[in-house]
Image (cartoon, grey):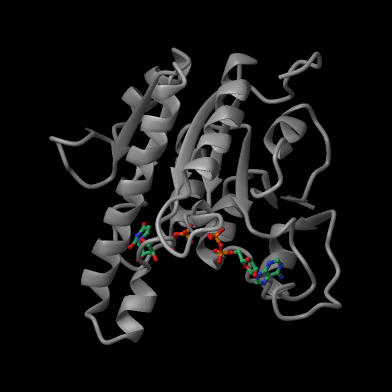
C-alpha cells in the first residue's frame, strides 16, 4: 500500500458472496477473487491484521431455498457450506500469491479446514496470516453480516468493513430507487430506525452494543480497501452519535 501508514491495526473485512460472481451467472469469477486477494495482501503487507468473513449468496442462501420449498434449517446449512466453498477459494487465491492464510470454520469440517477458536484466530492474524472465517456464526437464521459483526467484536478489531455491491448506505435501496441519496455518516440507531436494509438489524445492533465502527463500501471498485485503510472517507461510516 503506498506511502501513508495504515490508520487501522486490525480489521474485519466482510466480503459479499454475491459480488464474487462478477460477470458470471453463478459461482466465483477468478478475476474478482484474485483482485480482492491482491488488495488483502497489499493491506497485510502494510501491517494491518486481517480477518475475513465471506458470504455465500453467489451459491446458496437459506431464505431463497426456503422460499422454493426447502426446510429453512437445511437451507441455512447449505448456505453456510456455500461460505466454506468461497472461503477455500479465497485461501487458494491468497496462497497462490504467496500469502499465508487459514480458513477457520464455525462448523466442524476437520478434513477441510480448522475450527474457529478465538485464541488461535488471534494468533494467526498476529503472525500476519490472513484468517478467513467460514460457515458464518454456525447457526441457522443468522447471516454472514452478523457473523462479521461477531468476529470483529471477538477479535477486538478497530473497524468492521462491509464490502458490498453498493457504494454506501442510501436513504432507500438504490437498486430500486434511483433518487436515493447516500449518507457519509450515520449512527447505528439511525440505520435501525430508518430501516436501512443494507445490513441486517442483528448485525447493526451487535455493532452498536459493542461500539464497533462499521464502514460500508463498494467491493466492485478496485483500490477501495487500500483507500479506506489510509483514512479516505469511502462509502458510509456507521458509528455512535
Ligand atoms: N438503504 C440502503 N442503502 C444501501 N443499500 C441498500 C439499502 N437498502 C437495501 N440495500 C441493498 O442492500 C444490498 C447489500 O446487502 P446484501 O444483500 O446483504 O449484500 P451482500 O451480498 O453484500 O451481503 C445492496 O446491494 C442494496 O441493493
Ligand atoms: O451465521 C450464519 C451465516 C450464514 N448462514 C446461511 O448462509 C447463507 C449465505 O450467507 P449470506 O446470505 O450472509 O451471504 P452474502 O449475502 O454475504 O453473500 C445465508 O443466506 C444463510 O442461509 C447461516 O445460516 N448462518
Q: Is residue 60 above or below residue 233?
A: below
Q: Residue at x 78, y 67 (%)?
A: 170
Residue 179 at x, y = what percent?
Answer: 86, 78
Q: Is residue 7 above or below residue 103?
A: above
Q: Residue at x 51, y 63 (%)?
A: 202
Q: Residue at x 63, y 32 (%)?
A: 158
Q: Is residue 92 above or below residue 215?
A: above
Residue 150 visible to an observer of this rendering: no
Residue 200 at x, y = what percent?
Answer: 54, 66
Residue 220 at x, y = what percent?
Answer: 66, 50
Q: Quadrant of ligand 2?
A: bottom left
The part of the image, by quadrant, that contains residue 56 is bottom left
For this rendering, which residue is in front, 159 or 85? 85
Q: Residue at x 74, y 56 (%)?
A: 167
Q: Quadrant of the N terminus?
A: top right
Residue 90 at x, y = what percent?
Answer: 42, 37
Q: Is residue 129 left or right of residue 35?
A: left
Count of numbered marks: 0
The part of the image, by quadrant, that contains residue 12 is top right
Residue 78 visible to an observer of this rendering: yes
Q: Is residue 98 left or right of residue 231?
A: left
Q: Is residue 85 left or right of residue 148?
A: left
Amino acid at each position: 500500500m503506498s506511502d501513508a501508514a495504515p490508520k487501522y491495526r486490525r480489521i474485519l473485512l466482510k466480503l459479499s458472496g454475491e459480488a464474487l460472481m462478477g460477470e458470471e451467472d453463478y459461482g466465483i469469477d477468478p478475476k474478482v477473487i484474485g483482485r480482492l486477494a491482491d488488495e488483502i495482501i497489499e493491506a497485510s503487507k502494510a501491517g494491518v491484521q486481517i480477518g475475513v468473513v465471506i458470504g455465500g449468496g453467489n451459491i446458496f442462501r437459506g431464505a431463497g431455498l426456503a422460499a422454493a420449498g426447502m426446510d429453512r434449517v437445511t437451507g441455512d446449512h447449505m448456505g453456510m457450506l456455500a461460505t466454506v466453498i468461497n472461503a477455500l477459494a479465497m485461501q487458494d487465491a491468497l496462497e497462490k500469491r504467496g500469502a499465508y492464510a487459514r480458513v477457520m470454520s464455525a462448523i466442524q469440517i476437520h478434513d477441510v479446514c480448522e475450527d474457529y477458536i478465538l485464541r488461535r484466530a488471534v494468533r494467526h492474524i498476529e503472525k500476519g496470516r490472513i484468517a478467513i472465517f467460514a460457515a458464518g456464526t454456525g447457526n441457522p437464521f443468522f447471516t454472514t453480516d452478523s457473523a462479521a459483526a461477531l468476529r470483529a467484536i471477538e477479535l477486538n478489531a478497530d473497524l468492521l468493513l462491509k464490502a458490498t455491491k453498493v457504494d454506501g448506505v442510501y436513504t432507500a435501496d438504490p437498486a430500486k430507487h434511483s433518487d436515493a441519496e447516500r449518507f457519509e455518516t450515520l449512527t447505528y440507531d439511525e440505520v435501525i430506525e430508518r430501516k436501512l436494509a443494507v445490513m441486517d438489524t442483528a448485525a447493526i445492533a451487535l455493532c452498536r452494543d459493542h461500539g464497533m465502527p462499521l464502514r460500508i463500501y463498494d467491493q466492485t471498485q478496485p483500490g477501495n480497501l487500500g483507500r479506506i485503510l489510509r483514512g479516505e472517507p469511502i462509502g458510509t461510516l456507521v458509528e455512535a452519535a
